[in-house]
Amino acid sequence: MSARLLKHGAPSPVLVTAIREAALTGLLVVVLAVPFLGLKIENAGNGLLLETRWPAAFIAVGLAMGGRVLLVLGREWWHRPAVFDRFPGTVFLSERPLWGLGMAGILLALFLPLLLPNRYAIDTATTLLIYVMLGWGLNIVVGLAGLLDLGYVAFYAVGAYSYALLSLYFDYSFWLCLPLAGLLAALFGILLGFPVLRLRGDYLAIVTLGFGEIIRVVLTNWNTLTHGSQGISGIPRPSFFGLPFGVAVEGGPVTFSAFFGIAHDPLHRVIFLYYLILVLALGTNAFTLRIRRLPIGRAWEALREDETACRALGLDPTTIKLSAFAIGAMFAGLAGSFFAARQGFVSPESFAFLESAIILAIVVLGGMGSQTGVVVAAFVLVVLPEWFRDFVEYRMFLFGAAMVAVMLWRPQGLLSHRAPTLRLSPGPAPPH
Amino acid sequence: MQITDQTPSTPPLLEVEHVSMRFGGLVAINDLSFTATARRITAIIGPNGAGKTTLFNCLTGFYRPGVGRMTLHHPVRGPVRLERLEGFRVAREAGVARTFQNIRLFPRMSVLENLIVAQHHVLMRASVCTIAGLLGLSRYRRAEAHAVGKARHWLERVGLVAHADREAGTLPYGDQRRLEIARALCTDPLLLCLDEPAAGLDPRESQDLNRLLRSLRAEGVTILLIEHDMSVVMEISDKVVVLDHGQKIAVGPPAAIRTNPAVIRAYLGEEEDEPLPPEITGAIGEEGKAHG
């Protein structure tokens, strides 16, 4: 509304506009600040005490009004009619810079352990990559096939517990369990897929949400198998193709450091895990990019666009949906077994609904179907909160503010450009 | 053109016998029988709510009629009973393709991709359940090149080749209609069911559509057409089936349909049984007798 005033209103000098908008803003902030900042309820032993903090409310109102004046003046200075107009609705980044961005990101990821050889940075990067991989996996289900899945973390849990249980009861190694975890998760994906074949949109979301909770509740309560909420600890760490990372012991197995004749360093394992998840995540990405160009990938997208038209063209929605669920779940399973191997400990707590919500937020924020968008969004949602750990009280606030901002400016996600999977004519895309 | 289903050289491709479809108490189609001759254009007309689209939905596997038989005489597979096929198999196994009254494209995919999705089965077979495709084997690449070639052919035919790499949803309305027809043609249909293809087209586009449908007929595609635009119906159809309230009220060549009193009644409204005041009856008496 304010933008319109500035553009089409009576010939008002900037200052008048600024004052008018500042007054409106001030009014709004007064309404918000009086109850939120101005009044505070204290627990005074035998009752509640109402405390007033008027200075804080005044400061908030002043800041908001001053900010609004600066915003209006700054807008004029930029010769931009409105802040919102600066983000066009269609193409944000063309393909070429996006491709360059991707390559730069991969290079950076490859050399990160050399650039930042400290445990904290590599651990954070590993966590980021787990979420990137989960985001890429969910992108197949939500972004490509258009099936809103709120219980994706269930497959992550299946993968993690597959490795934990197989190693606990059968002493299987990580490298054997990794593909098994992927297969088991895919199987659960199909298992979930069958009952929800007829459901779409909101109904599908609710059932998948329920499925996620079922898995978590089963893991919590099946004490004899899963040790319930205590979780499973002492999960063996993955070896470097048979070479363990521990300190060399007399008579023990040949360790990684001993084999290569270097000094033992606990960082070796951290770096190895980092590269392992990097390979898994990039594999997921390569698979998705490739399968998008194959009939099954196009069928997923066609199903997202119009299921009725798919049926009329002879595409079988059942197999298309099940394959999307299965393949999406498989990647979550792989990520899950990596997670179990990295932590050495799994408990149902790690697979709460919040995790599903974060993964879905990564996909939606990134721009449904955009692979690069997932990385950017995962960075925003996983690494930034890590950096702002000092402002821990404000984390959720910033999280919410970021989500609101994206929904206002980029409702289609940060990177929503979709490149056709094949072209009739070579050369740049025609203007949309 | 005076071609009726009695012409011996052209056997019926589609035989609909005693089909009824009801939704609860509503009878959408009541004991409907007709045939569609191979390599001919059969138009289905009728007032709104006559059951035309319901008939299409039955033929293309979206509804299963309660009673009746729908037989497609496939040149290779022999007679195929459409009502026995699972919905999505109709396109593949009987060669029946359709378009929709409210266009149903894949709007965020490119024009070309829309046509490639229509060739899903050929490509899926060539990609050997995705594995050969993942490995990038030449067999799959050849199949894809062939599919692109077919898509290009139909894009040229409907005049959209210049827009092949555009997002389908950004095309103007008339182009979207033609793209939907091209997409249906990419499935190599024996029977093409078009649900109001001329709706919303300007006269020039409508003429282009007539030309396209005529050339398709010449190439051996059998067309079943729902249309309200009488200029299209009268100009290109070989046979017209008229429905009203789910019942067939007339069938025949367009010229005969144009003068059929039952059809005129269905479209212009029935004369009510209620007796009119004598002064009015007297005034319209001449006209009333003419309709007889």
Image (tube, helix red, strand yellow):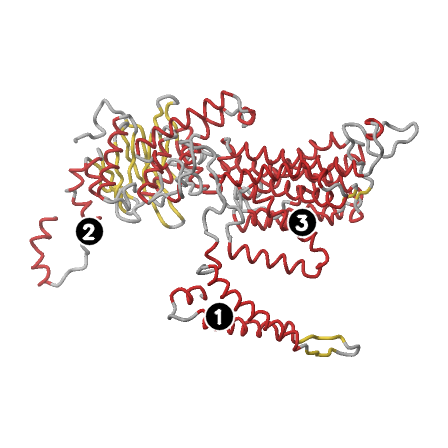
Q: Indicate whether A234 appears above or below A386.
A: above
Quadrant that contains the N terminus of chain A: bottom left
Q: Say which mark, if any, is on residue B285.
A: none
Label 2 chain ID: B
Give the amino acid at mark 1.
Ala
Tell me the SS state at disc 2. helix
Frontmost of labels 1 and 2 is 1
Residue drawn where x is 79% and y is 45% of the image: A231
Query: Same chain for the residues at labels 3 and 2, yes or no?
Result: no
Q: Which residue is mark 3?
A: A383
Q: Indicate whether B113 appears above or below B101.
A: above
Q: Indicate whether A38 appears above or below A336.
A: below
Q: Which residue is mark 1?
A: A18
Label 1 chain ID: A
Quadrant that contains the C terminus of chain A: top left
Give the amino acid at mark 2.
Leu
Q: Which residue is mark 2?
A: B268
Measure the alpha-carbon separation of dots 3 and 2: 70 Å
Tell me the SS state at disc 1. helix
Residue B151 percent coordinates (x, y)? 38, 30
